[in-house]
Image (cartoon, rainbow, N blue to C red):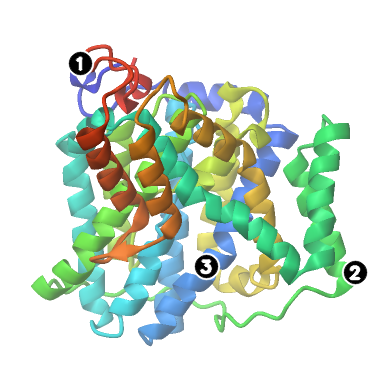
Amino acid sequence: METGKHGLIEPGPGIGAGLRDLTGNINLKTASAGLVAAIFGCSGPALIVIGAADAGSLTNGQTVAWLLAIYGLGGLISLLMGLYYKVPITGAYSIPGAALVAGSLAVFPFDQAVGAFIMAGIIVLILGVTGLIGKVMRWLPMPIVMAMIAGALIRFGIGAVNAVSALPIVVGAAVVAFFLSMRFLKAVPPVLSALVVGLVAAAVMGSFGGSDAGIRFVLPEFTAPTFSIDAFLAIAIPLAILVVGAENAQATGVLLAEKYKAPVNAMTIISGVGGILAGFLGGHNANIAGPMTAICSSDQAGENRDGRYAATVVNGVLFAAFGIFAGAVVPLILMLPGPLIGAVAGLAMINVLVMAFQSAFSKAAGYQIGAFVALIIAMSNISILGISAPFWALLIGATVSMLVEKPAVSKDDGSASVGASSVA
């Protein structure tokens, strides 16, 4: 389907159809994938947000409002997109964006940062409404996008290996359980086996930690925005680029790797709306999330690709609940051993990484030099002008291919471009 024939937002089966088929698609595999994605998103990333709040000397109420905004709205995005399109399009927020904001809050008062959050959402919304992002994604060669995905997500695989050295017995037990379950327990999702065995091992070894979140159950405290040119340039523009050039681009590539049609315009528009609403609540953005989409769309969510959206729905419910009860839940979730959660998330992305590498470096698809450039830039995790590596991986990889390579197929055919897979 081409968006130009149907309006700005790509049509889908509809929320009614998603709800009707949901009960038949919620099973052990989809539920466990959604649970793992939620635990991943609510553990280490939450600590980054809390650290950013500490850097800005925010009150506990402002911190709780921030968490409510990004987790509550991120969960809502999962529910809306997952049910409407029946595709595992998962919402959350930009983790690099939280790190960007942490540095900015040392310079800007929080009310100006909140104004910048809203302006970032407006920028993303404009990019979606104009259809610009959809046009760019249809132009980008598929191998370069897949190479960016492989480079951006490989850190999770490497993190799983490093986690073994951090907690050898706990993480080692989880890894062994994952592969043994994959081989011998076809009815049990390997990622669930890894999580359960890892938690049992952590309990036996006494690896659960104390919480240093410093948040108590308090009501959210909302902050009135103040708009300034300096905050617009320093926060809003880089944050908007992170949302579309890192998170949404990663999620789009992951979905394409798993053979889904990615509604690029709708993903951008809802990320813009999510950013505006999150800003008014005091959060830096709510958008489509790359890593959580990767977990929910992977084979760990079940063999039935059409039913994996149920994992996103489960994740959305858990995310929203985490946001609503953030003041009470954060100290508990942060007691989980970080290396174990990182390892389980890395294991869940194995199939996504394999398919991304295969798509990126297939001789038939071409663009191999540009794909390699995109891979190493995404792996480098560099940040230039406040913009993270995935954006530069796509831009520089495509530029190199345009200079030195010819496509394996003609542009009229289009089968080597993202658009050929994202529209029907």
Tell which residue pokes out farthest to the bottom in this image. 57
| In front: label 2 or label 3 | 2
Neighbor class of circle 3 (other Cα within 10 Å; few <14, some 14-19, many 20+) is: many
Residue 272 is situated, as x and y percent measured from the top left of the image, at 26, 48
Q: Residue at x 27, y 30 (%)?
A: 405
Considering the numbered disc 3 on the image, is that residue within a helix, a strand or a loop?
Answer: helix
| Image position of 98 with respect to 401: above or below | below
Residue highlighted by disc 1: 5
Pointers 1 and 2 in contact (C-beta within 8 Å): no
Instruction: State how far apart marks 2 and 3 are (Cα).
Output: 26 Å
Q: Could you tell whether 384 is left or right of 344 in the image?
A: left
Q: Residue furthest left?
A: 229
Residue 40 in percent (x, y) is at 60, 57
Q: Earlier in the sequence, mark 1 or mark 3?
A: 1
Q: Which residue is mark 2?
A: 204
* Nearer to the camera, 68 or 49: 49
Q: Which mark is residue 46?
A: 3
Reading the chain from its start, which is encountered first: label 2 or label 3?
Answer: 3
Amino acid marked by disc 2: Val
